[in-house]
Amino acid sequence: MSRASVGFYCNMIVADHSGPKAQVYEKGKNKPLWFSQVRDAFAYKSMPGEAQNISIIYVHDMGQAVSYEHPQVSGIWTDAASAFYVINSDKRGGMGARETIPFKEKAKAEMFAKLNQGIVVAFNDIPLDYLWGDEGDYETK
């Protein structure tokens, strides 16, 4: 991530936004699509016609971040599919909307959720409607 990394939806410099970020790699492309919020990358993945050729999504491992507001730009990326996510927390994403906050280690996600009023879910358990809008509460099963 550099000053040249521009958000796919917002068209703004990704590094200027607080919180975790995401990068989506698509087959046949050398450069990732950048997202100022992890939730936006997952919304992109879920949209019919948008994400036809995703090969991998990387997200910040917030368990390694020096701060929530300014996670490091390198060295803390993890595969989105194997991460755990805190949703419904008090923390917002870089664009001001609620966020899917990624952690490589479940224990660190659980600690963050306890401190910030969230719940922990796996990648495949993120409710689709959580990715769209800011209404509704989500509880673990």
Image: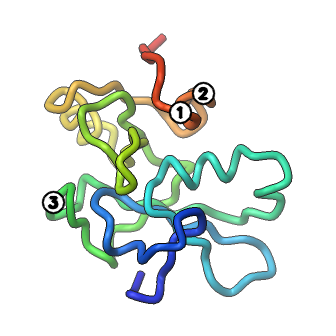
Q: CA distance from mark 1 to mark 2?
A: 8 Å
Give residue 85's quadrant in the image. top left
Q: Is residue 124 left or right of residue 5?
A: right
Amino acid type at circle 3 is: Ser
Instruction: Out of 138 and 61, give the one closest to the viewer.
Output: 138
What residue is shown at x 54% (from left), y 39% (from top)? 123
What residue is shown at x 36% (from left), y 35% (from top)? 86
Task: Answer few, some or many: residues within 10 Å of disc 2's Cα (few below 14, many 20 plus, some between 14 and 19).
Answer: few
Classify 72 as above or below 86: below
- Please tell me whether mark 3 sits on a helix, a strand or a loop: loop
From the image, tell me which residue sits under label 2. Answer: 129
Query: Disc 1 or disc 2, which is closer to the eye?
Result: 1
- Please tell me whether mark 2 sits on a helix, a strand or a loop: helix
What residue is shown at x 48% (from left), y 10% (from top)? 141
Q: Is there CB contact under 8 Å for labels 3 and 1?
A: no
What residue is shown at x 34% (from left), y 75% (from top)? 15
Classify 88 as above or below 4: above
From the image, tell me which residue sits under label 3. Answer: 67
Give the x, y percent position of residue 20: 35, 58
Q: Is residue 43 left or right of residue 123?
A: right
- Please tell me whether mark 1 sits on a helix, a strand or a loop: loop
Q: Is there CB contact under 8 Å for labels 2 and 3?
A: no
Labelled disc at residue 133: 1
Mark found first going from the N terminus, 3 or 1 = 3
Classify 34 as above or below 51: below
Task: Answer few, some or many: residues within 10 Å of disc 1's Cα (few below 14, many 20 plus, some between 14 and 19).
Answer: few
